[in-house]
């Protein structure tokens, strides 16, 4: 017998077409608890219990004669230690009948193990599905948190460059944008103007009416600046009552006229706290200018307006400072 069949864990035996046992492995001897001499050359049905013999003659033999194969034939062997229920599979191979037999309790054990493995596989699959679902939930939560974080960062970024009182852009924003504006003006040879505005006597107003009124004036003045400038103009609250307006593609005289409109609007506005006026200084970009040089010239022009009685606009063309006519 083939060495692999000899070592097979299940009982294996070979019969001729008359069901006479010719060969077998050790597992078959162990199943029947017999020696080789006791079964070799004997018909299979002689090893069965009485009821199993009847079933063998009436079912196994006629079915096998027709199909030359039978699967899961349940039978019972008669052994010295008592009946041994078994399941039998048989098929014709090279004119011999090859059979494999497995004791029922072993087969049941295998079935139980298979059922247990199936349940384990189902549990693993369920756990995998749950893990996948949980992973999707975590990923969705991560995406949502990331979106919220991005929105929060954008909001914080916006807040960092926004004046909380007037909602205008602040000095930080101007510092970030001016390098781009200066670079664009230098490369494209396009003008832009910068104006500094200061609310006259604002310190006295704060001392007389209080900071709440002062804050209200700052907000109203900011609204005037926004409404009287173009969408492309940049209105900045630098600090306190000081403001800067950057006006792209605008020459000095045109920019001064635009700022003077703001001055007139402030002067004509019916304030609840007495007359409010504003002074301003305007300059225009010249080749080689920096943010500091522009602000210095605008500040000189602003000081001229202050020294000349306030509520005025003055110009600095890069060489001299003159009042706006």
Image (tube, grey):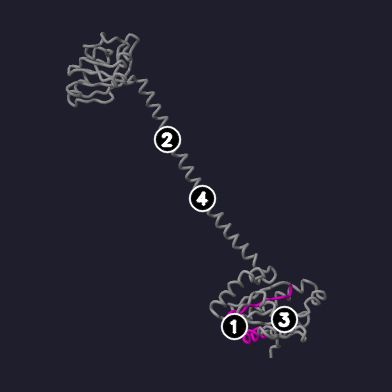
Reading the image, the residue beneath label 4 is: 139
Labels in figure, total: 4
| 211 to 227, vertically: above or below | above
Q: Quadrant of residue 291?
A: bottom right
Label 1 vs 3, first from the N-terminus? 1
Label 4 – label 3 distance at C-alpha: 59 Å
State which quarter of the image contains the N terminus. Answer: top left
How far is disc 2 from disc 4 in space, using C-alphas? 26 Å
Confirm whether the magenta stretch covers residue 125. no
Determine whether the residue tagged by mark 3 lies in a helix, strand or loop.
helix
Does the image show residue 63? Answer: no
Q: Are marks 1 and 4 in contact (CB under 8 Å)?
A: no
Counting residues from the N terminus, which is met first, the one under dot 2 or under dot 3? 2
Q: Earlier in the sequence, mark 2 or mark 4?
A: 2
Q: Position of residue 225 (x, y in %)?
A: 66, 79
Q: Is residue 234 visible?
A: yes
Distance of mark 1 from mark 4, alpha carbons? 51 Å
Q: Earlier in the sequence, mark 1 or mark 2?
A: 2
The residue pinned by badge 2 equals: 121
Mark 4 or 3: the one toward you: 3
Task: For marks 2 and 3, give the CA distance.
Answer: 84 Å
Which residue carries the number 3 mark? 300
Secondary structure beneath disc 4? helix
Q: Nearer the viewer, mark 1 or mark 2?
A: 1
Which numbered disc, 4 or 3, marks the residue that appears first in the sequence? Answer: 4
Q: Please tell me which residue is depicted at 81% across the width and 75% down the height of the picture.
A: 209
Residue 249 within the magenta-colored segment of the rendering: yes
Q: Nearer the viewer, residue 276 or 7?
A: 7
Magenta highlight range: 240-261
**Mark 2 or 3, which is nearer the eye?**
3
Neighbour tally class for label 2: few under 14, some 14-19, many 20 plus, Cα within 10 Å: few
| Residue designated by label 1 | 250
């Amino acid at each position: 017998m083939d060495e692999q069949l000899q070592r097979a864990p299940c009982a294996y035996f070979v019969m001729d077409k008359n069901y006479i046992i010719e060969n077998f492995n050790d597992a078959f001897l162990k199943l029947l608890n017999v020696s080789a001499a006791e079964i070799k050359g004997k018909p299979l049905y002689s090893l069965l219990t009485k009821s199993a013999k009847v079933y063998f003659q009436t079912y196994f033999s006629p079915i096998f004669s027709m199909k030359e194969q039978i699967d899961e034939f349940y039978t019972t062997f008669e052994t010295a230690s008592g009946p041994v229920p078994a399941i039998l599979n048989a098929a014709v191979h090279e004119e011999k009948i090859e059979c494999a037999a497995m004791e029922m309790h072993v087969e049941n054990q295998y079935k139980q193990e298979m059922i247990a493995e199936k349940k384990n596989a189902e549990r693993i699959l369920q756990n995998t599905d749950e893990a996948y679902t949980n992973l999707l939930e975590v990923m969705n939560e991560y995406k949502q948190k990331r979106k919220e974080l991005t929105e929060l960062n954008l909001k914080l970024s916006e807040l960092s460059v926004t004046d909380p009182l007037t909602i205008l852009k602040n000095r930080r924003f101007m510092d970030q944008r001016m390098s781009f504006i200066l670079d664009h003006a230098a490369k494209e040879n396009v003008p832009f103007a910068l104006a500094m505005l200061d609310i006259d006597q604002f310190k006295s107003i704060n001392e007389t009416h209080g900071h709440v009124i002062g804050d209200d004036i700052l907000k109203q003045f900011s609204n005037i600046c926004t409404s009287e400038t173009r969408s492309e103009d940049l209105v900045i609250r630098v600090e306190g009552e000081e403001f800067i307006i950057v006006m792209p593609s605008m020459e000095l005289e045109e920019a001064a006229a635009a700022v003077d409109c703001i001055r007139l609007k402030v002067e004509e506005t019916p304030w609840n706290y007495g007359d409010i006026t504003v002074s301003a200084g305007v300059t225009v970009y010249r080749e080689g200018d920096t943010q500091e040089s522009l602000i210095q010239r605008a500040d000189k022009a602003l000081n001229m307006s202050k020294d000349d009685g306030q509520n005025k606009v003055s110009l600095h063309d890069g060489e001299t400072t003159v009042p706006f006519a």
